Amino acid sequence: MSSKSGGWPVISIAGIAAAVVYLIFAFVAFLKYPGAYGPLTNWLSDLGNPLANPSGALFYRLGCILSGAALVLFYLKLGIWNTGSKKTRVLLTIAQYTGVFSAVCLIVTGIFPLGTSTEIHSLWSMMLYISLGFFLTFSATALMKNPAFKKGFGYYSFVTAAVNFMFGAILHEIFWAEWISVGLFIAYVLMITYNSVALARYS
């Protein structure tokens, strides 16, 4: 089955959908947040806390769930880059598995929010960032072996992976570290989205 849809590969459509859905729903939740809110005093997940944001929490949580679903498709379709040596294919397959797991973690954090299910949310949130670190590391290692993948995107991914590992394992009590981790990851998804369009056009 072709990975293309209307000239664009499915991975690119899924990547854009994941980023846009998350950002729009998070922005709506932010507009409904009743008090001061920012990267120095709040987690992103505070937007989904029904106790802190009673009229906007549902939007953020729904955004996480829908974005996570789109990311599952994004990770599965990463297989269009699955060329080259057996070692490269294995690395990319591991990246896909860890990516899908991270998407499941994101969905679970949307189902179990801060405030009403803090312990569950915190556990899955920690696993989310650690698994993203593995996805970023394995995907960059595999993709950089493909001459069609821009090397700068791969180097960027290693930096993003380090940030996610540090936040998930060490800096998980620092508010702004989470914002940086999420922002860097969204940018990487869009980089793969862009590069995959070029791959589809010239393959």
Image (cartoon, rainbow, N blue to C red):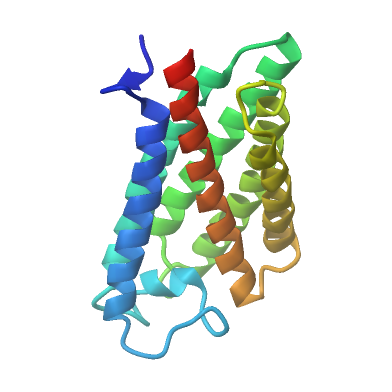
Instruction: Locate residue 49, reporting x and y percent.
Output: 39, 73
Q: Quadrant of residue 175?
A: bottom right
Is residue 161 left or right of 78 when viewed as pictured? right
Q: Is residue 47 above or below residue 65?
A: below
Q: Residue furthest front?
A: 202
Q: Residue at x 67, y 11 (%)?
A: 84
Instruction: Locate residue 51, reporting x and y percent.
Output: 35, 80
Residue 146 or 173: which is nearer the viewer?
Answer: 146
Instruction: Locate residue 128, reporting x and y percent.
Output: 57, 51
Q: Is residue 176 visible?
A: yes
Residue 99 or 199: which is nearer the viewer?
Answer: 199
Q: Is residue 142 above or below residue 60?
A: above
Is residue 108 left or right of 89 when viewed as pictured? left
Q: How many marks?
A: 0
Q: Residue at x 33, y 79 (%)?
A: 53
Instruction: Locate residue 69, reporting x and y percent.
Output: 37, 40
Q: Residue at x 50, y 48 (%)?
A: 105
Residue 190 or 66: which is nearer the viewer?
Answer: 190
Q: Residue furthest bottom?
A: 35
Q: Which quadrant is home to the N terminus?
A: top left
Q: Is residue 12 above or below residue 119?
A: above
Q: Is residue 61 visible?
A: no
Q: Residue at x 43, y 84 (%)?
A: 37
Q: Is residue 37 above or below residue 79?
A: below
